[in-house]
Amino acid sequence: MRQKLLIMLLVMMVSASPAEACSLLRQSRHRMACMWRIRQVVHRLPRSREAVVEREQSVRLDPSQVDVHIDYGTDWYEKGEYDKAIAEYSESIQLNPQHAIAYYYRGLTWYAKGEYDKAIADYNEALQLDPRWADVYNDRGTAWYKEGESGKAIADYSETIALDPKHVQAYYHRGLTWTREGKHVEAIADYTKAIEYRPRFADAYNDRGISWSRLGEYNKAMSDYNDAIRLEPAHVHAYNNRGIEWSREGEHDKAITDYTIAILLNPKYADAFSNRGVAWNKLGEYERSIRDHNEAIRLDPMHVYAYNSRGNTWFAAGEYDKALSDYNQVLSLDSKYVAAYSNRGNLWSRTGEYDKAIEDYSQAIRLDPNYAIDLHSRGLAWKQIGEYDKAIKDFTKAILLNPKYADAYGSRGLAWKYKGRYDKALDDYNEAIRLDPRHANAHNNRGLAWKHEGEKDKAFLDFSRAIEIDPKHTNAHNNRGIEWYEKGEYDNAIADYNEALRLDPEHAIAYHNRGLAWSQKAKYDNAIADYDNAIRLDPKYATAYENRGFALGVTGAYGKAIADYNEAIRLQPKLASNYNSLAWLMATCPSAAHRDGPTAVKHATTACELTEWKQSYIIDTLAAAYAEAGDFEEAVKRQQQAIALLAEDADRTEYVKHLEAYKTRKPHRE
């Protein structure tokens, strides 16, 4: 009889009005429970005002009806009145402590309130009463996930799947948990299962795309984001994630388009604003980047990624104080945010505060010991302060973590160079180029190593290759200019220096080197102008003072020349050429007012001592100084010493002329 009544009621509730169904059930208070069970079966029929009144009457008639309280609680739940829903479910449990559904529904409500521990407690009770209820395991898994208990979450999802091998949500949720744990192969397997059982599951495609991306399978990630958007054209997260992939490929315009669509779909989507800000930064659109990051932070004042990314934009724009403020803000919100330490370290390196940079990189490495980039960055900072062994140690660790890290090989090569180990430097540059044949810096630096080893042709080829790869490689243009200069190809040298200065108008070395080329072409005014610029940019550039002194001397500005040589000596008191240049001018100057034999002897002697009396041209200067001082006997002795040091195939003509003059008690004059 009861079964017939249930069937009849079901038919009436589907085909008739709720009022008619309530009229039938009014015959017995005990039948009210049947009514609400049926309502669960047909999953929420439309509720007229009359139906709601009928249900309230049924509760007054018999408050002990457990299912009525459950349904009442469900209504409150759907309205977002979670406390009232919990009160109804609690009443059901008090009436029937063995009612698994009441525990389960109350657990769902605790979950909706964010009280995951209470949700888990209710799910536990439901499972005690019904140990094979797959949905409860799944939902308890989501609560464990929210509590950060990934292991327990995975165990519950696995139990769900064991009970129901086609439980789509369990596969999907377990995939999310694997993703959070960094186990993307396992995550992809679960997302794929979810898609197999629900082929139009857009979220599963989107999240599988994230895992593909983390594995470096960017094409597969892009394909999944495309499918997510195809299945759900308003899937904001898929647009955002596809934008990230476009940015990764350097397609920042396409990325901006996707982020913009995501923002149009959800104007409060802080992540999309922040990511679009990153793309604007990559395009050099710093104002737009800052504007987007500001909006992301307005929407979510705790958005650490937005603060960090805005800091990166300020950094790129040269606003270092503002960048520092943003990085500090990130770390005040999350003291374990590795990227902020890394980026602040980069800032300290840029401003030359290498000790602070090393401190920040070290903190980043403590938090993430397996991040090769921070080890490389710290190595660069060690290199800048001359700690080459520590730099090599960090570069080596970075290479062990990532054997394909071409930059780390290149940087270690530089450190070996500074230690004078050009053989090891060449090995590292070769490996960097093998890993990345278009590594312009490695080609440039290998060129410098070849030059040191006397392999000038190889050096020239490497500098040229660096320029071919990166036409804007300033140092490669400068270095090739030096090679042209040493070949006597001064016009070609000047052309390379011109390009270096076009690319970097504040390249002091390029100005200096172009000055040398102008001097060789006897364009001394041009040379002096270039030396002026080199010194303006680097007031401690001793060699520029020395060479400007030479050009000034040639043009007759002897007093200025002497002043430049003295400044060069002050800046580099251990450099023999500075003393030699000054001594030569003071010994041989056409202007008697600027000649000073005894002072010339003093400076030339210092130059000889600094070179351990092994340089013939410096001893030649000393001989000229003695001649100017009137000590021709010593002048002859020193000139003979200079000639004896000349190589067998060297041209001795000038040296012999000097000797013959001294023998006749005639000083040398320029």
Image: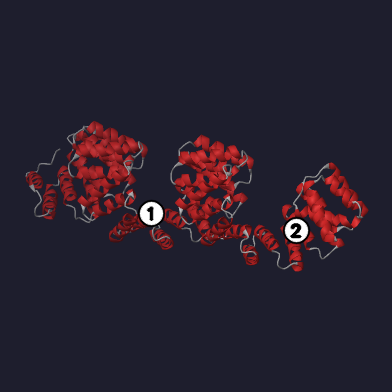
Left or right relative to 552: residue 127: right
Q: Is residue 502 left or right of residue 155?
A: left
Q: Position of residue 440 (x, y in %)?
A: 32, 48
Residue 150's disc is none
Quadrant of the drawing holding the C terminus: top left
Q: Which image quarter: residue 474? A: top left
- Which label number is shown at residue 407? 1
Residue density around tag 2, few if under 14, some if 14–19, many if 20 or more, within 10 Å: many
Residue at 44% x, 54% y is: 377
Image coordinates of residue 78 in percent, x first then y, are: 76, 48
Colour scheme in the image?
Answer: secondary structure
What residue would you read off at disc 2? 107
Secondary structure of the residue carrying tag 2 is helix
Tag nearer the camera, 1 or 2: 2
Considering depth in this image, is 572 or 84 the residue closer to the camera? Answer: 84
Place of residue 427 in the rendered image (x, y in percent of width and height, measured from the top left): 30, 60
Kindly identify the amino acid type of the residue bearing the numbered disc 2: Gly
Vertical order, 126 against 617 (above or below) = below
**365 versus 626 height, above or below:** below
1 and 2 marks in contact (CB < 8 Å): no
Residue 605 in picture, x, y percent from top left: 22, 50
Residue in the foreground of this view, choosing between 265 and 652: 265
Category of crowding for the residue at label 1, using alpha-carbon neighbours closer than 10 angstroms: few (below 14), some (14–19), many (at least 20): many
Residue 599 in sight in this render? no
Q: Quadrant of residue 144?
A: bottom right
